[in-house]
Structures are given as structure tokens and as C-alpha cells.
Image (cartoon, rainbow, N blue to C red):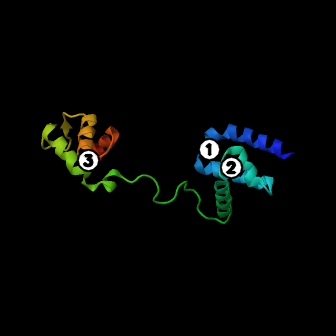
Amino acid sequence: MRRAEQLETIRRKYAALAPLLNERTRRCWAATEAQTLGYGGVSLVARATGGARGTIQAGLREIEQAGAGTDVRRIGQPGGGRKELTRKDPALVAPLNELVEPTTRGDPASPLRWTGKSTTKLAEELRKAGHPLSQRSVCRLLYEQH
């Protein structure tokens, strides 16, 4: 099969699979395609998929590690991802409680608190006070505080 035909075949395969792949499976799939092509396979797959050669080479290393018995179930690196809001901004909980407390309703003996302010209003007031966060983050923080 000529290189042009191989390129088109890889493009069709990738177009069919791309919606189903996450970052890791995309990398490993591209690496196995490159392996089957032999010399020049990494460049050809990179051209066909629009991926970086380094990404495909990382996939090749990952496949080798899997064969060596290394745990490769993780998609990202340990410690990766977003940090918790209260970790990034430890002073966030106190201002939130100060905003909620004056409008709290219900039985003081009950652990459940009710507030007259919406989470959208609470988020706006916290942003004005220098704590950038969304309405959903306010919901999550209130939930975590029971």
C-alpha cells in the first residue's frame, strides 16, 4: 500500500474513533498505528491525525511500560487537575459564612441552615470582595459545610 493510501486509511479510522477516545486512548491508538507501519509510521500518523510526533512517541513509551507491568491506568499525572477552592483561597469560607449568617433562617438547634440569599447573589458578593468563583462553586462550598 502506498503512503498516500495509508495516510487516507488512517484519517478514516481516526475520524471514526475520535469521538470515542480520551487523551490517553487517542495517544495509545496513534502509537499502535505507528508501530504497525514501521519506519516513518510516527510521522505518517501525526500527519494523518494532526497530532504531535512527541505525543505519539509518548504513547509508544506508555505501551512499552504497560508490557513491563507498570500501572498505567491513570490518565493524568498524580496531583494534576484543578486545586480545591479552599486550598487556593483558604480565607474563602469565613467571608461566605459572614454573608450567609445574617440571613439564616430556621431552628438554631438544627444543623440545617436556610438562607434568604441566592447562590448567584452570594457569588457576586464574594467576587466583589476579591474571591473569584462561580455560583456552582458557592453551591459546592455550602454543601460541603452541610
**Precedes in sequence: disc 2 or disc 1:** 1
Q: Residue at x 59, y 49 (%)?
A: 23
From what the image shows, is residue 108 above or below residue 58? above
Q: Is residue 65 left or right of residue 9?
A: left
| Residue tagged 2 | 29
Q: Position of residue 69 (x, y in %)?
A: 64, 65
**Residue 13 sits in quarter:** top right
Contact, mark 1 vs mark 3 (Cβ under 8 Å):
no
Q: Is residue 60 left or right of residue 131?
A: right
Contact, mark 2 vs mark 1 (Cβ under 8 Å):
yes
Q: Which mark is residue 130?
A: 3
Q: Which quarter of the rendering shows the N terminus?
A: top right
**In the structure shown, which secondary structural element does the residue marked by tag 3 occupy?**
loop
C-alpha distance separating marks 3 and 2: 45 Å
Q: Amino acid at mark 1?
A: Leu
C-alpha distance separating marks 1 and 3: 39 Å
Q: Amino acid at mark 3?
A: Gly
Q: Residue at x 48, y 60 (%)?
A: 78
Q: Amino acid at mark 2?
A: Trp
Q: Residues within 10 Å of mark 2 (few under 14, many from 20)?
A: some
| Residue tagged 1 | 21
Q: Residues within 10 Å of mark 3 (few under 14, many from 20)?
A: few
Q: Residues within 10 Å of mark 1 (few under 14, many from 20)?
A: few
From what the image shows, is residue 114 above or below residue 43? above
**Precedes in sequence: disc 1 or disc 3:** 1
Q: Which mark is residue 90?
A: none
Residue most toward the right?
1
